[in-house]
Amino acid sequence: MITGKITLHMVCFSLGLSAATAIADESATPPPSLTLGIAGINAPRYSGADKQHWQLMPVIQTRDGAFFFDSLKGIGYDLQADNGLYLEHTLGYGLGRSDRKSSWRDGDDRLRGMGNIDATVNTALAAGWSVTPWFVVEGKATLPLSDSQGVQYRTSVTLIPWQTQDDTVALQVAGLAGDARYMNTWYGVSSGQSAHSRFERYNAAGGFYGTDTSLTWSHQFTSAWAASVIGDYTWLDKHASDSPIVARHNGTSATLALSYTF
């Protein structure tokens, strides 16, 4: 999906941005930390939907050295070199998609007859380079482990044009791609699905399928309390937008998150 998950990823990114900057400025290893929060998200019901819905999602992050737990990413570790190169490996969980309206994952009654996309355990590997404190490039691959749903790829560029002790503004532009299995899991319509739904059969080609652009403003009220406001715009290329399940080839979402770090 390219709505809620990516938006919440930007929440996690923005909430951790001030801490990451502080870490970069200090030679000493930071002490273990725990961040708890809540995020309210208004986003399309699924990738390509023409209807929006609200979701409340927990934000939980804990870190001890290179190891961390993140309520979106899962458990993992990251390694960073002095020249700004970094590597991140995670083991997480994807919620899949329902063919009914859902309050806790993607889904809509419009998809009735398509069947559910199962939740799955996944692993993700990201490699990036913090070229400067305000310019970061990254490539990421996500591979489902417990169900054969294909591989998703994401390449992103993040600019931080404004950062003070209390405020940070970040702009991220990402290109999205997937192999043929991934594309047909999320955008394809098989013969069986076509027979049980109102959609014509569609075989989605693998490759580039969209972009995602997010603008994040993060404000630090105190050393513990922080908030983030995020606006997100997604656009689907023809490999995805030609699918009969796609009602809109572009979509917007908004997120407000509040967190407390111990």
Image (cartoon, rainbow, N blue to C red):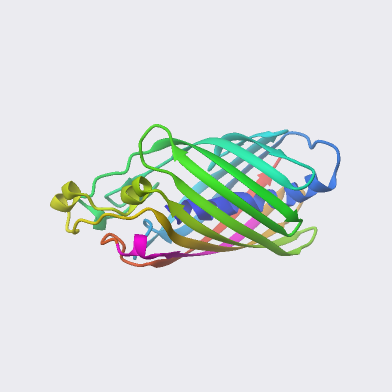
Residue 104 falls left or right of residue 262: left
Percent across and percent down for residue 73 are 54, 41
Q: Residue at x 27, y 50 (%)?
A: 100
Residue 127 falls left or right of residue 21: left
Residue 95 falls left or right of residue 242: right
- Look at the image and give the residue range highlighted in magenta: 227-242
Percent across and percent down for residue 236 are 41, 64
Q: Is residue 241 magenta?
A: yes
Residue 249 falls left or right of residue 36: left
Q: Residue at x 41, y 67 (%)?
A: 250
Q: Residue at x 23, y 49 (%)?
A: 114
Task: Determine if residue 212 is in view.
Answer: yes
Compare residues 172 and 111 and report the one nearer the observer. 172
Quarter of the image where the C terminus is located: top right
Residue 227, by quadrant, is bottom right
Report the predominant secondary structure element of the magenta stretch: strand
Compare residues 86 and 1 and report the one nearer the observer. 86
Residue, far left: 195
Q: Is residue 33 magenta?
A: no
